[in-house]
Image (spheres, coloured by chain):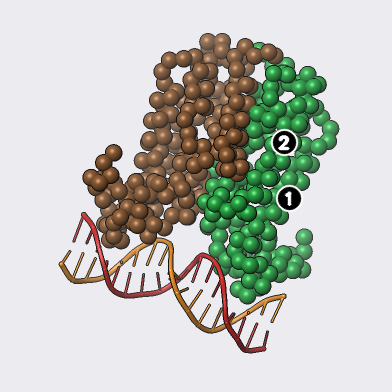
Chain colours: A green, B brown, C orange, D red
Amino acid sequence: MYTGRMSTEERLIRSTRELLWERGYVGTSPRAILERAGVGQGSMYHHFKGKPDLALAAIRRTAEELRAEVEAVLTGPGTPYERIEGYLRRERDVLRGCPVGRLTMDPDIVASDALRAPVDETLDAIRERLAGIVEEGKEQGEFPSSLDGEEIAAAILATVQGGYVLARASGSPGAFDAGVRGLLALLAPHRPA
Amino acid sequence: MYTGRMSTEERLIRSTRELLWERGYVGTSPRAILERAGVGQGSMYHHFKGKPDLALAAIRRTAEELRAEVEAVLTGPGTPYERIEGYLRRERDVLRGCPVGRLTMDPDIVASDALRAPVDETLDAIRERLAGIVEEGKEQGEFPSSLDGEEIAAAILATVQGGYVLARASGSPGAFDAGVRGLLALLAPHRPA
DNA sequence: GTCTATACGGTGATAGAC
DNA sequence: GTCTATCACCGTATAGAC
C-alpha cells in the first residue's frame, strides 16, 4: 500500500476507518479525520456530504474487508469443527476489538438506518456462513443433529464479540482466549457426555 | 424511588448513569447531565471534581447494582445448569445493551485506569461466580469433568456481552436469544454425544 | 480539487454573586 | 449549595479564493 500515492479521497477514508475503530463515531471529529489524513477542511466536503457520508464509506470498506478475511478463514480444507476453530483462533489484535461490532455501541450509528445497515449485514452474513458450516458438521456426524445451526452460529459469533468486551475490560487478551477455549470445549466432537 | 425528593447529588448520579448507558462516556456532556438532572452548572462542580469524577461515581453505582442483580439470579435453588439458564434468560432490555460492558468500547474509559477498574472488577466478579457454579456442576456430574470452569464462565459471559452486539446490530433481540439457546444446547446435561 | 477564513453552537471548566 | 456569567477551545459546516 503506497500511502504517499493515495488519492485524497482514499486518505480520508483510511483515516476515518482508523478513527472509527479507535474512538467510535461520536468520538471521531471531522477535524481529527482531516488532521490524520493530512488534508484541509474543504477536501472532505468536496468528496463527501459530511461526517455521516464519509463514515458510511469508511464503514462499508471496513465491512467488506472483514467479510473477506472471515471468508478466507472459513473456506478451505478441514472439517467443520476445524474451520470454526480456525475462525475462533484467527489472528486478531484482541484489545482493539472488532471494527464492525464496536459500532453497535455507538448511539448515532444505531440511530441511523443507513449507518447501521452495513454493520447488520456484515454480522448477519458471518452468522449465516457459520450456520452453514455447523449444518455441514451435523450431516457429517461431527456435531449432534440435535443442534440448531443458526443458534450455534449466534453463540459462536457472540462469544467472539463478547470476548472483545471482556478483554478490553481487563486490559489483556486472556479472557477472550479463555472464552474461545471454553466454547471449543463445548463444541468438540466426540467429547465425553 | 422518590425522584422529587432526591438530593442534588443523587440526581446528578442518576442522570449520569442514564446517559452513560444510552450514549457512553464520550457521548455524554456535562451540559446534558445537568439538563436532565434539572440542576445548574455550579452544583455539579460543587459535588464533583469534574466529568470523570462524576462518571466514576455513576459507574460504581451501576456496577454495584448489576452485581447485586446477577447475584440474586445465581443464588438460590436449582441445579448449576438451571441457575446458569436463569442468568442467561433473565429479563433484560436487550437492545439497551449492558450498562457496564458497553463502557469497554469507550476510548476514554479504557484509557483511564480509574474509570476502567469498576468495569473490570464487575465483569471479573461475575465470571468468577459463574466459574464456581460450573465447578459445582462438575462435582455433581451435571457437566463433564473435562470442562474448565473458568473457560466455560468466560464463554457464558462473552455470549451475553456479544449477544447485545448482535441484537443492537439487527435492531431486534432475536440474535441475543438465539445465541443463548445455542449456548444452552451445548451446555445441556445428558445431551446426546 | 484543495486551501483558508469564517460561523455558530457545544464542551468542559472557573469565578463569583446570592 | 446553588445559580448565572464567562471563558478558551472544539465540532460541524459553509463560503469563497486560488
- Toward which corner of the image does residue A2 lie, by quadrant? bottom right
Q: Please provide percent x and percent y for residue B96.
A: 49, 42
- With A180 as the anchor, is A77 left or right in this view? right
At numbered mark 1, what does the secondary structure look like: helix, strand or loop? helix
Q: Is residue B29 left or right of residue B37?
A: right
Give the numbered dot on residue A128: 2
| Residue occupying image coordinates x 50% and y 29% | B127
Name the mark nearer the viewer: 1 or 2.
Answer: 2
Where residue B12 sits in the image (x, y, percent)? 32, 50
Residue at 56% of width from left, 12% of height from top?
B142
> Residue at the spot x=58%, y=28% of the render?
B180
The residue carrying mark 1 is A64
Q: Report which quarter residue B147 is drawn in.
A: top right
Number of other residues with Cα within 10 Å of mark 1, as a class: few under 14, some 14 to 19, many 20 or more: few
Q: Are both tags, 1 and 2, on one chain?
A: yes
Q: Chain ID for label 1?
A: A
- Is tag 1's residue or tag 2's residue first in the polypeptide sequence? 1
| Location of residue A49 with respect to B119 vertically, above or below | below
Q: Can the viewer see residue A171?
A: no
Q: Is residue B189 in view from this perspective?
A: yes
Q: Quadrant of the N terminus of chain A?
A: bottom right
Q: In screen coordinates, is A71 left or right of A35?
A: right
Residue A147, horizontal then vertical, whole percent: 69, 22
Gap in Å between the C-alphas at discs 1 and 2? 16 Å
Amino acid type at mark 2: Glu
Chain of the residue under the numbered disc 2 shown in the image: A
